[in-house]
């Protein structure tokens, strides 16, 4: 006769399955924890320096476990980073989030979330720290690639879509809360914003993530209005918990995310990530000293247990097989996403028609020019790095797509060599832009050797080696040095290569690898075709060839605006120790100041043409409404269009045009379809001491191809 024993955690799950309230099960499990086990929940399980040593060799190669209690069967929060895929193992590198924002396709993003969740769970993790929804106030921000665009509504909807997808297999963590959009100074800068700016601009996407069921919120490194985000009571207990009703778990950013054990706990930070650091060293004595209480410990423990029980009691997919990791299915999805993300900015006539798409059958020779063409370039090398076993470069994709053509690659930074190759080719494709050396997470030694940060670390054991040198403080999250961009323009030599190539061959295409906006004024009118290809993931080279050759429509749309001058942007100092954020940035700042964008928010060309004939707004229900837009493909081939809804109002100190909703549609030549677009009136609300109120009583609703589209269909929108 055999006996089957269950753990306390399994007992709690059975309570929930029997229909007992989740809170009852949480309290029953909490009661079985010893005081020491309660404290164990509040940080990572590994000792600090062994954890740092492991991560400095291979960051997040396996789940980072926080709060597992073997005696009671509590699995703990088993962390894997993101967002371009699962950082653990050899996973699928999807295009970066900014590229996915350029698809304007929420269903596609949800599918990515499903794939990420499966790869994560198959490798033993349950806690995905990759729903990055920070707003890039300035395009120089080094980690712009990790987020979806410049608009709060776009950010919130994409974050919600990713959460929905991940939830089939894992808990989802939104980050970095809040006001995180500077990289080099992220450990030291105090970002200040008034209440209206916070609630109208920099927090709505986090509120939307909470509504979508985010299981965790990760705080940012920076200070907000004079207090570090990881111990900011206003943000954590005030706004997140009391105003928004968040019931999940709050976690710090890694290693330097809090500046005090007790003060962070009292302020509402539940878990110090990723290891046993300040809380393990100081919290027991600080509780005795009255700086925090056991009630605060229990409060955090309840949230941690509740989050795990809610996840394991949810309707999850069957356990994925390890074969899902970098599977053909997921690589195909990465390919599809990359295709849809690429933005055609310019496509002028050359001889008898637009240069793009290229006719593969007529090409006998192609010059591929640029140092980046043959480089596997999927994004920065910090905490978001995904280590796919194979990456298809732009050169790989073009060669594979043109087996009957001679493809010549000019890698050197040599305008004369580029011009010579272009002269001898049917078409020249110039691949320029950035790498992890230019933009990305900043993990430089000057940041990591900051005395204030080093004081947060326990003493290093004698003889320990990190980064190959005794006593070195090598980074634990990668080796990236990119940081915030020093310039919004291409390297001067890249601009010279573009100009020389275009002068030698009028059939020149420029492909720009970037995350944020690139100012192109010196050369953009000198070339007939320009494509933004992003950091496009493991299948990006094949996708680029598909777009250039017209195997798919050029259907990406900019998730931000591109100005004509740096002077049209907000002030930015990547070394600032204090900065004030207001509501004016991106397209809304260009609109306010009357500066036409080089390319406005939402802009992108197609290989066909579309017309939106009319739009009808249904009555507003609370803060939401739907609109019906009639769209016709007026061109000669199948294509994909993005219908964008903008609200236009005239109100003091408020943007004149804001994004309210969007939807995508595929149409055959000559086909007309009515597209239902879900939208929100929240972007048209002001924050007051009494909460949100409409900024105006009426708005003009535009159904447009981009912000400020003169051909937009319009109707009135009642905001009462």
Image (cartoon, rainbow, N blue to C red):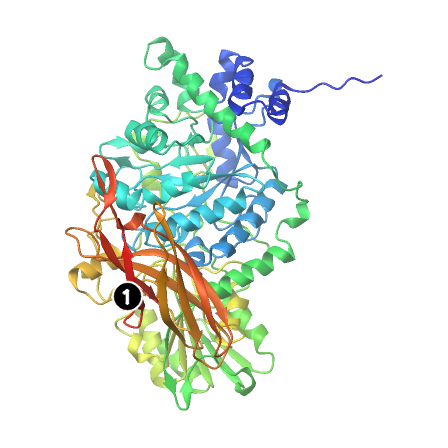
Task: In the rendered view, tell whether residue 202 sits above or below residue 617.
Answer: above
Q: Who's the residue at 40% across and 65% down the image? A: 629
Which residue is farthest bottom?
352
- Along the viewing direction, whichever of 320 and 440 lies nearer the viewer: 320
Which quarter of the figure is the N terminus placed in? top right
Question: In which image quadrant can residue 118 be found?
Answer: top right
Q: Is residue 393 above or below residue 246?
A: below
Q: Which residue is mark 1?
A: 519
Location of residue 498 in the rendering, given as x and y in whole percent from the top left corner: 35, 75
Q: Residue at x 31, y 72 (%)?
A: 495
- State left or right for residue 670 relative to residue 705: right
Give the image location of residue 571, x and y in percent.
19, 52
Query: In screen coordinates, is 697 left or right of 429?
Result: left
Query: Which percent across, then down, holds residue 338?
Result: 50, 62
Secondary structure, mark 1, is: loop
Single out the residue that lies furthest toward the right: 1
């Amino acid at each position: 006769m055999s006996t089957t024993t269950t753990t306390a955690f399994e007992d709690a799950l059975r309570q929930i399955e029997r229909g007992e309230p989740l809170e009852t099960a949480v309290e029953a499990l909490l009661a079985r924890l010893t005081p020491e086990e309660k404290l164990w929940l509040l940080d990572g399980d590994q000792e600090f320096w062994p954890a740092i040593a492991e991560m400095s060799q291979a960051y997040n190669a396996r789940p980072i476990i926080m709060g597992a209690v073997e005696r009671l069967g509590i699995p703990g929060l088993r962390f894997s980073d993101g967002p371009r895929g699962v950082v653990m193992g050899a996973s699928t590198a999807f295009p970066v989030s900014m590229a996915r924002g350029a698809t304007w396709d929420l269903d596609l993003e949800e599918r990515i979330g499903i794939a990420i969740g499966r790869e994560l769970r198959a490798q033993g993790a349950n806690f995905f720290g990759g729903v990055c929804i920070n707003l890039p106030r300035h395009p120089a921000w080094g980690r712009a690639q990790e987020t979806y665009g410049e608009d709060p509504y776009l950010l919130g909807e994409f974050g919600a879509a990713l959460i929905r997808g991940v939830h089939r297999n894992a808990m989802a963590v939104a980050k970095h809360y809040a006001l995180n959009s500077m990289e080099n100074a992220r450990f030291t800068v105090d970002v200040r914003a008034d209440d209206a700016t916070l609630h109208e601009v920099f927090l709505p996407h986090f509120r939307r993530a909470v509504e979508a069921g985010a299981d965790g919120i990760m705080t940012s490194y920076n200070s907000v209005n004079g207090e570090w985000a990881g111990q900011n009571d206003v943000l954590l207990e005030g706004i997140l918990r009391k105003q928004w009703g968040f019931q999940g778990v709050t976690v710090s950013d890694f290693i330097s995310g809090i500046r005090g054990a007790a003060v962070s706990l009292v302020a509402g930070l539940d878990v110090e990530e990723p290891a046993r650091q300040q809380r393990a060293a100081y919290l027991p004595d600080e509780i005795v000293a009255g700086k925090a209480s056991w009630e605060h410990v229990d409060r955090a423990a309840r949230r941690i247990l509740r989050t795990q029980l809610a996840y394991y009691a949810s309707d999850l997919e069957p356990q994925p097989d390890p074969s899902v990791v970098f599977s053909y299915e997921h690589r195909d999805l990465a390919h599809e996403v990359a295709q849809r993300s690429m933005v055609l900015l310019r496509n002028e006539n050359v001889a008898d028609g637009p240069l793009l798409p290229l006719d593969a059958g007529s090409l006998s020779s192609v010059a591929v020019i640029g140092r980046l063409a043959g480089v596997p370039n999927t994004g920065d090398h910090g905490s978001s790095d995904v280590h796919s076993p194979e990456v298809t470069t732009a050169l790989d994709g073009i060669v594979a797509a043109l087996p009957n053509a001679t493809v010549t690659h000019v890698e050197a930074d040599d305008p004369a060599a580029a011009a010579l190759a272009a002269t001898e080719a049917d078409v020249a494709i110039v691949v320029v832009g950035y790498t992890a050396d230019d933009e990305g997470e900043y993990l430089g030694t000057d940041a990591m050797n900051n005395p204030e940060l080093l004081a947060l670390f326990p003493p290093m054991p004698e003889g320990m080696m990190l980064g190959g040198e005794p006593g070195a403080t090598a980074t634990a999250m990668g080796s990236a040095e990119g940081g915030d961009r020093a310039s919004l323009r291409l390297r001067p030599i890249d601009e010279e290569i573009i100009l020389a190539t275009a002068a030698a061959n009028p059939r020149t295409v420029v492909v720009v690898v970037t995350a944020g906006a690139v100012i192109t004024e010196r050369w953009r009118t000198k070339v007939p075709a320009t494509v933004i290809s992003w950091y496009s993931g493991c299948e990006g080279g094949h996708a680029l060839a598909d777009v250039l050759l017209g195997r798919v429509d050029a259907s990406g749309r900019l998730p931000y605006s591109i100005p004509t001058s740096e002077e049209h942007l907000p002030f930015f100092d990547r070394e600032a120790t204090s900065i004030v954020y207001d509501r004016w940035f991106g397209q809304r700042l260009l609109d306010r100041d009357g500066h036409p964008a080089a390319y406005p928010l939402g802009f992108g060309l197609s290989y066909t043409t579309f017309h939106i004939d009319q739009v009808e707004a249904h009555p507003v229900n609370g803060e939401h409404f739907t609109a019906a837009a009639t769209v016709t493909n007026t061109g000669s081939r199948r294509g994909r269009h993005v219908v964008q809804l903008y609200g236009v109002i005239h109100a003091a100190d408020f943007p004149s045009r804001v994004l309210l909703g969007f939807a995508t549609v595929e149409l055959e030549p000559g086909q007309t379809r009515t597209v239902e677009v879900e939208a929100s009136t929240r972007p048209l609300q002001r924050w007051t001491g009494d909460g949100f109120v409409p900024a105006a009583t009426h708005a003009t609703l535009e159904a447009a191809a981009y912000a400020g589209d003169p051909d937009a269909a319009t109707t009135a929108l009642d905001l009462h």
